[in-house]
Amino acid sequence: MALNPESPCVNICVMDEESGLCVGCLRTIDEIIAWGGLASEARRALMKALPERKARLGARALKRLAILTRARGEAS
């Protein structure tokens, strides 16, 4: 396992108001801000929580993510 996990950022920065999570990286704004100063263990723990967070996102947020992802792919 990497000593310093990479950021989960996928350059889709849209906060879901209902869950408080970014629909791109699934982090809260506080976690995004703190990421650079987090210890490797804290980063790994956060990364491990991301799949469960995606399951918590509402259908509206997941639809929005799909639209943004497609638009980003078309723009490339």
Image (cartoon, rainbow, N blue to C red):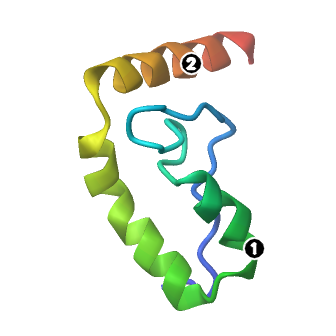
Is the C terminus in the top left, top right, bottom left or bottom right quadrant? top right
Label 2 Cα crowd, 10 Å radius (few <14 / some 14-19 / many 20+): some
Q: Which mark is residue 49?
A: none
Tell me the amino acid under the disc marked 2.
Leu
On screen, residue 49 versus residue 65, left or right, reads left
Question: Quarter-wise, where is residue 24 in the image?
Answer: top right
In the displayed image of the protein, which residue is found farthest to the front? Answer: 18
Residue 59 percent across, percent down from the top left: 27, 22
Q: Secondary structure at mark 1?
A: helix
Q: Is residue 68 above or below residue 23?
A: above
**Which residue does the image show at 48% across and 44% down from the upper left?**
21
Question: Quarter-wise, where is residue 70 in the image?
Answer: top right
Q: CA distance from mark 1 to mark 2?
A: 25 Å
Q: Closer to us: mark 1 or mark 2?
A: 1
**Which residue does the image show at 54% across and 53% down from the upper left?**
28
Residue bearing mark 1: 36
Q: Secondary structure at mark 2?
A: helix
Label 1 Cα crowd, 10 Å radius (few <14 / some 14-19 / many 20+): few
Q: Is residue 56 above or below residue 31?
A: above
Q: Nearer the viewer, residue 76 or 50?
A: 50
Q: Nearer the viewer, residue 6 or 60?
A: 60
Tell me the amino acid under the disc marked 1.
Gly
Q: Earlier in the sequence, mark 1 or mark 2?
A: 1
**Which residue does the image show at 56% across and 18% down from the upper left?**
68
Question: Quarter-wise, where is residue 57 in the image?
Answer: top left
On screen, residue 61 versus residue 25, left or right, reads left
Q: Nearer the viewer, residue 2 or 65?
A: 65
Residue bearing mark 2: 68
On screen, residue 30 versus residue 1, left or right, reads right
